[in-house]
Image (cartoon, rainbow, N blue to C red):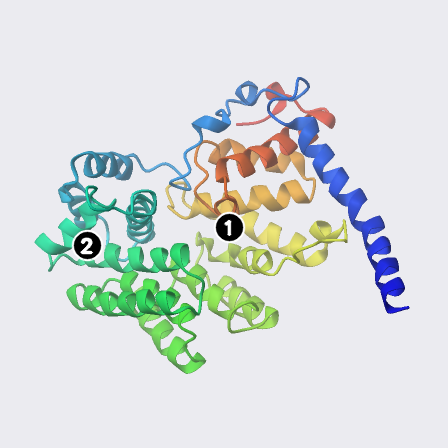
Amino acid sequence: MAILWLLLALLMLSCVLLPLVRRRRGMIEQVHPGHPDAADPADYGFLRQEELDVRLPGPDQDLLDALELVQRTQDPTAAAQLLAGTETAGELRWQRVQALAGAAALELQQRPGGVHETPGGQWLRVWRAERPEDAGGAAVHAEFLVQRAWRASAAGTEDFRILMEEAREVCGQAAGLAPADPVPHIIELAVARGLGASREEFERLWLKVLDRAPHHMGAHLAALHYWCEKWHGSREQAYAFAEAAAARAPKGSLLAALPLFAVFEHLPEVNLVLSLYQSEVITKAIQGARHAVHEARSEDPTLPHVRHLLVFFLVRAERWAEAMRELIHVDGHVGALPWTLAADPAAEFAVYRALAVAGYEANGGSPASLPG
């Protein structure tokens, strides 16, 4: 009898899920870039999927030039000079440290090295060996260890713990070399989350960040993860943290968009409620993020992060025209949430972009009617 009940339950579940899966698959197939009825991204000035840059959330030509030179020559001088000339307390330094560390981690993953092969990311080893007093190099090294831990090992394993402990030590070195720089402490927020720091320990570390950069968007994104349900907090704590940060955000700050990131972190794995993305909670978070984008400086380095997440939510909410307006600003670079969670970020972004184009045109939109 138990087996009969189990089979009946599975049959009922399939009746609910299969139509949703087919609908989702049908939408994607209908507007897949290769489909003859799909709109051409070039009609809107969008890049082809294979042209999308997965390294960064938005343009930073100085960083890309430095990274290209470093990877080609294995000489870290260009990267060291770039960070030395980047404002210490600004968002751009955090973003550039992340990008350089991510490049080194990816190189090592692709070329782990061997008897007759030099491992990838050798330029970072040279940087640390030849410039041990360079605060930028120490920060990149610390972030490299954190990213390597997440890429190579499952949280809680011995290898993961060893890499995180080493990252914490290097964070301390980086902080000692540049006491006013918040980046080493922001990196340590991820270390504390990974190692399961107590709330008292985490809050002491958070105060160090606030003392140096109280309105740092990157720092708040790093701290938000700790308070999320899947780590050490709850949905209520994450929402409270995000809403408090948004409430005290100065004019022009993108912290007003933080509740949207909190909502994203707590989306259900399987959504059986089609109206979820039009609910009051998500609608309010979207409106807060859109207002923050409108008020922010156009050169704010974290602006693309917010715009990318807005694309995701606006497409899910079937707000096609608004999604298209955000796509105009971010198309070309896809190194941001939520795309980076996918195995192929460019492909994931292209699917959502195609859905936005299809929905926009189905409601009378066209390239000529889309405002710049």
Q: Give the residue displayed 25% in from the left and 46% down from the top.
A: 113
Q: Nearer the viewer, residue 343 or 10?
A: 10
Q: Is residue 185 visible?
A: no
Q: Residue 245 location, x and y as percent?
A: 48, 65
Q: Give the residue displayed 52% in from the left and 45% down from the top.
A: 342
- Residue picked out by circle 2: 137
Res 238 quadrant in image? bottom right
Left or right of 200? Residue 34 is: right
- Residue picked out by circle 1: 292
- Label 1: how many Cα within 10 Å (few below 14, some 14–19, many 20+): many
Q: Give the residue displayed 20% in from the left and 39% down from the top.
A: 70
Q: Nearer the viewer, residue 235 or 103?
A: 103
Q: Residue furthest left?
A: 130
Amino acid at dot 2: Gly
* Up-down relation of residue 355 to residue 167 (above or below): above
Dot placed on the residue nearer the N-terminal end, 1 or 2? 2
Q: Residue furthest front?
A: 115
- Label 2: how many Cα within 10 Å (few below 14, some 14–19, many 20+): many
Distance from disc 1 to disc 2, alpha carbons, whole Å, reads 33 Å
Q: Residue 275 location, x and y as percent?
A: 76, 50
Res 153 quadrant in image? bottom left
Q: Is residue 200 visible?
A: yes
Q: Quadrant of the N terminus?
A: bottom right
